Amino acid sequence: MEKWQEKEYKRDKIIENAVNAADRIILDGSDGSSEETNYLTAIVAKRLAEKALLPFQTALQKRDLNES
């Protein structure tokens, strides 16, 4: 296996493990209904998206301040 393939495989496993962990936590905490489970899943996804966007927001704000 090429080095880049090993890196890609490792990243895929990290992502899979993170999704599985989030699913377990959500299912353990949910009341068991599909409505609550789906809601919790959506909110977790939203918060992860916000966290992922933070560096871009910070970079834009920094650029805007430097232009002033």
Image (tube, rainbow, N blue to C red):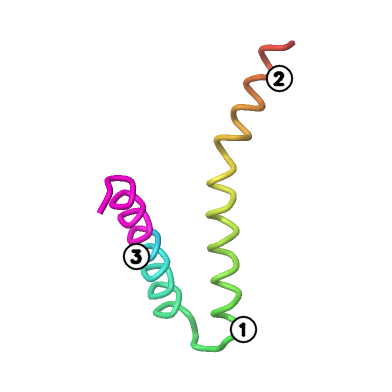
Q: Nearer the viewer, residue 14 or 40?
A: 14
The image quadrant of residue 65 is top right
Q: Nearer the viewer, residue 34 or 2?
A: 2
The image quadrant of residue 45 is bottom right
Q: Compared with residue 33, is residue 49 higher up or lower down, i.e. above or below?
A: above
Q: Secondary structure at mark 1?
A: helix
Q: Compared with residue 24, is residue 17 higher up or lower down, i.e. above or below?
A: above
Q: Which callout, 3 or 2, points at the residue further toward the start of the chain?
A: 3
Q: Name the amino acid, label 1.
A: Glu
- Give the foreground label among 2 and 1: 2
Q: Secondary structure at mark 3?
A: helix
- Give the foreground label among 3 and 2: 3
Q: Which residue is mark 3?
A: 17
Q: Which residue is mark 2?
A: 64
Q: Residues within 10 Å of mark 2 (few under 14, many from 20)?
A: few
Question: For the view shown, which residue lies furthest in the bottom direction?
Answer: 33
Q: Which residues are magenta?
A: 1-14
Q: Which callout, 2 or 1, points at the residue further toward the start of the chain?
A: 1
Q: Name the amino acid, label 3.
A: Asn
Q: Residues within 10 Å of mark 1 (few under 14, many from 20)?
A: few
Q: Name the amino acid, label 2.
A: Asp
Residue 68 on the magenta segment: no
- Write the residue at 56% across / 55% down: 47
| Marks 3/1: CA–CA distance | 24 Å
| Marks 2/1: CA–CA distance | 41 Å
Q: Compared with residue 12, is residue 30 higher up or lower down, i.e. above or below?
A: below
Q: Compared with residue 30, is residue 49 higher up or lower down, i.e. above or below?
A: above
Q: Which residue is mark 1?
A: 35
Residue 2 on the magenta segment: yes
Residue 51 appears left or right of 35 = left
Residue 12 appears left or right of 41 = left
